[in-house]
Amino acid sequence: MPIYAVTGASGQLGRLAVQELLALGVPASDVVAVVRTPSKAADLAERGVGVREGDYARPETLGAALAGVDRLLLVSSSEPGRRVAHHTNVIGTAKAAGVSRIVYTSMLNADTTTNPLASEHENTEQALAAAGVPFTLLRNGWYTENYTGQIGQYLERGEIVGAAAGGRISAASRQDYAAAAAAALLQGEEGNRTFELGGPAFSLPEFARVISEVSGVPITYRDLPVDAYASSLQQAGLDAETARFVAALDASIAHGDLETDSRDLARLLGRPATSLTDVVRASVTPPPRPLRPTHDALLEQE
Ligand SMILES: NC(=O)c1ccc[n+]([C@@H]2O[C@H](COP(=O)([O-])OP(=O)(O)OC[C@H]3O[C@@H](n4cnc5c(N)ncnc54)[C@H](OP(=O)(O)O)[C@@H]3O)[C@@H](O)[C@H]2O)c1
């Protein structure tokens, strides 16, 4: 039986990918969770998954982490600016360890997009090609959670502000990307593959409408020119560089760079991607209901 390893397994996507492998019937003893801090993966160890220390920034830890591994899911590093060095360390070690396939979480349209985060993914894709180990590129679109994680703020303010105009976003839930990653790891095919992954596309005005419908609270989308959006982010407390960066992400959405009509995600999942409404529904906290009748309610009953 092949041994599967998942890096970044203490993170949100990596942990879900390990759980998806187990759900697909891979024995826990055939799964290795590679993590920077093993104590963060105690839950996986309890399920019988092999937890090994592996720090992208410390290549000396990676050889033991990848020993005996056949198929590797390399979850991209969460440290922009250091990603290429991190990923190159993992790719070089994986090659030396005899890994037979590297599955890498890249970015949607990585080779054509204007998204300011893309160059490190494109450089990693080039490093994979140069290494000569068969690879699978999972060019993931935006996580829907990038937006649903802020629903509380949207509900509080009654609006979403951005500079994405009517640009459509083929986002999907982390859970769906993780399930697709597990399916890609299990595929026994030859050669290199590229999957452009995204769910049903929506614009931010449409997203606002879905939140309104699900929550019952009217939310609107207010679009600003890119520079004005950057200024508003700065006024809200971001430093100038981060504000420009976040605004540039929206500009790339307006440009259509986070949209795809690819059906690769649904094909890997063997079902449609989770709908936007369902992801929003899971994120909108229902109004609190008392666990037991309140004092006033009891008095009313008497
Ligand atoms: N598509 C999108 O919308 C989107 C959004 C955000 C991020 N991403 C990318 O997708 C990746 C996975 O997303 P996520 O939500 O799972 O992120 P996450 O929860 O922040 O997890 C990132 C993982 O990377 C690990 N990591 C970071 N630096 C490392 C190092 N030097 N050595 C070993 N492991 C290291 C972290 O380990 P620790 O637990 O030790 O910190 C963590 O396990 C991110 O890292 C980022 O590249 C994509």
Image (cartoon, rainbow, N blue to C red):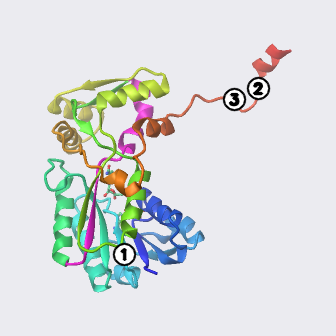
The residue that disc 1 covers is: 71
Do labels 1 and 2 touch, CB within 8 Å? no
Check the image and report above or below for 137 versus 145. below
Upstream in sequence: badge 1 or badge 2: 1
Residue 154 in percent (x, y) is at 39, 29
Q: Is residue 168 left or right of residue 209?
A: left
Residue 78 in percent (x, y) is at 32, 59
Residue 52 in percent (x, y) is at 46, 76
Q: Which of 192 and 240 is in front in this view?
A: 192
Q: What stretch is highlighted in magenta?
A: 132-158
Circle 1 sits in a helix, a strand or a loop, which is it?
Answer: strand
Do labels 3 and 2 touch, CB within 8 Å? yes
| Disc 3: residue Cβ within 8 A of ligand 1's nearest atom | no
Mark 1 and mark 2: Cα distance apart in space: 55 Å
Category of crowding for the residue at label 3, using alpha-carbon neighbours closer than 10 angstroms: few (below 14), some (14–19), many (at least 20): few
- Residue 148 falls within the magenta-colored stretch: yes
Taking the spot 16% from the left edge, 33% from the top edge, the residue there is 226
The residue that disc 3 covers is: 290
Instruction: Name the residue at the right extreme.
Output: 302
Q: In which quarter of the image is ligand 1?
A: bottom left
Mark 1 vs mark 2: in front: 1
Taking the spot 42% from the left edge, 20% from the top edge, the residue there is 218
